Amino acid sequence: MFTHLTTPSAGKIIESMGNLVQFLQMTAQISGAHTVEFYTEDVWKSLVAVSPESVLSIFSQQKPCYEEREVPDMSKIFSPATNQLVNLELFVEAAQYSSLMNLGLCTPIEQIFKTFASQSANKLSLPALLVTPIRSYELLNFKQPNEIMKNTEIKTDQFMNDKKSHEVAIMSQFVEALANVYGLKQVIDLGAGKGYLSSYLSMRYDLKVYGIDSSHTNTDGANERNRKLKKYWQVYKTDARTTSKAKKSDQKKETLLPKNSCQDVNADQDISRQTESDIRCTRLSNSESCMDDDRNQFTDSSKGQNKKESNEAMENTDAYSAFSFLDILPAGAVEVPSVSQSVSKVLSEQEKEQRKMENIKAKKFPETHVYSPLTSYVTAETELHDIITDLEDSIMVGLHTCGDLAPNTLRIFTSKPEIKAVCSVGCCYHFLSEEFDHQKEERIEGSWGFPMSQYLKERCWHIGRNARMSACLALERVAVGQGLPNESLFYRAVLQVICKEVYGITQRSYSLIPQSKDILKIDQRVGKIYSKSTSFTDYVRKSLKKFGQDDLRLSDDQIMEYYQKYEPRRNELEAFNRLKVFLAPCIEALILLDRLSYLREQESIAWSGLVKLFDPVKSPRCYAVVALKQL
């Protein structure tokens, strides 16, 4: 049924994994080095024989270039005698060759949409599929990702941040096309978080969505949004007809919004305690994508552009869609009284009466445009019937599912006949469990996050947590000046020198009694102290207190002496992190190919592949693992 979809052979996948294993084994000393111990272990001098300036220079000149090329000679990258990196150019060439796009193993998204359209037309006679997804796939030029937004009725960027809006708009179209191919209406969203994708799929495409998340906080918030959407969805859908005719009414330039209202509302604010004039426009923060989301998701220029586009849309009331009010209403952000008071100021008596009648009608409409948030911790052994009582043939999706949830999504798909297709975008590789982790005291049977494929299982392949942390780095973002918190990494590395020399603390252990051999193993993580610190001295004192140490043993001058000692070597740490950034796509490639190889080993699957869904600058974890069962 899916013969028109190109896909690499199982042999090609195995060959590519073999080459990746060889390269990653060779470079493991770099990807596996922990930056916390950078100065205490003198990492640069031990592992690199080229200058920091040369690394920073070659990185600034390199741009992500995806094209198939010949296998480079990797034998000359490191010195056989010292095992140090000696050939920087060859290192970069080998890393680029080993990235997923250069390996030529992805299926173009345009080809998939064409095939879906053909299958839908032949099997289901659904020409409606040609209206939205197929018209939009031609616009999927990731150099201009906002183009896809301009062809959707709901402007997602009005109630999500730029990154989440980009992801939801594209993935929802992909999922809707999948649902049309199979003629299904039920979608299961694993790791649904705050429910952005789930609610969008249900409202925009009238799909019956179950959003499952292990966090009660996320589910409770999603339920509150659900409650408000049930109450207001049909009302504002009808309201738009009045709004779109605003220029022709007595209120020539009035809309349903007061003049001083804002389009972007922070859903985390309690605006019920604020006056109308106190409300300020702020973007929603994205807490769902973990390591994927850098603190600075927007440049000043992109903020300005988004605001400019939003203002233009507000001025052109004829351009309002049927969901204009939801465009400015982040779910759960606006209290009901505040909305009512704002609307009453600009509506005429006739329009108020019309609105009242529409409210009465809305209560009689079936509540089809809502989704069901559920709380459950999902594993490979989870029985979906225990969570979803009316489970039927479904599409399973996951947008940036964290750690083991991504591989478990694939295991559930292969084991449950009700799940006809899966589209999984994973993230947070550092949270993956590894079956052959050398640091485990004993080997435990079970479903591990890595490896999944028989090829890597037979070789007992192990990546390691530090290398998996490296896989979370974003080459494309760093290439445009985003994504690496260089100063906070420098602070932490120098702090570790102080911890070791003054307090006898190593990264993951400290001595209860100085000079004692009794060591207590703990996890010494600083957390978010950097963002709350006013200076390096403040950072050190707060960190030491968190470690349970007496920060007064050091004066401010003594603390700054450490800073000044290592400041001239800051470029070493920055350059070393650039080397790790080059390796990030290679480690991610092995993880994703392992999942694809696992799917190829299953007999019930008609087609499986890797698809680049998102712009990697906007959303670094941009690859989806997609698999389809027979129609």
Image (cartoon, rainbow, N blue to C red):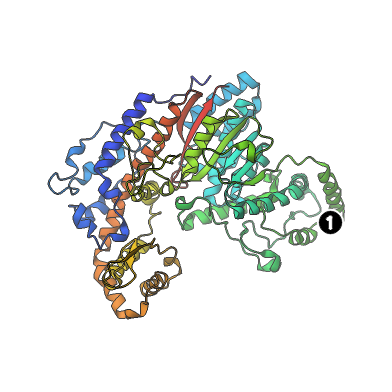
Identify the residue shown where x is 24% and y is 42%.
26
Counting from the top left corner in percent of width and height, residue 57 is at 26, 52
Give 335 or 157, whichever is nearer the viewer. Answer: 335
- In the image: residue 447, left or right of residue 104: right
Give 426 or 579, whichever is nearer the viewer. Answer: 426
- In the image: residue 282, left or right of residue 67: right
Identify the residue shown where x is 38% and y is 31%.
454
Secondary element at tag 1: loop
Counting from the top left corner in percent of width and height, residue 199 is at 64, 44
Give 204 or 372, whichever is nearer the viewer. Answer: 372
Under mark 1, the amino acid is Ser
Give the residue at mark 1: 348
Residue 139 seen in the figure = no
Which quadrant would residue 191 be assigned to in this image? Answer: top right
Identify the residue shown where x is 62% and y is 19%.
123
- How packed is label 1: few (under 14 Cα within 10 Å), some, or many (20 or more)? some
For residue 326, above or below residue 453: below
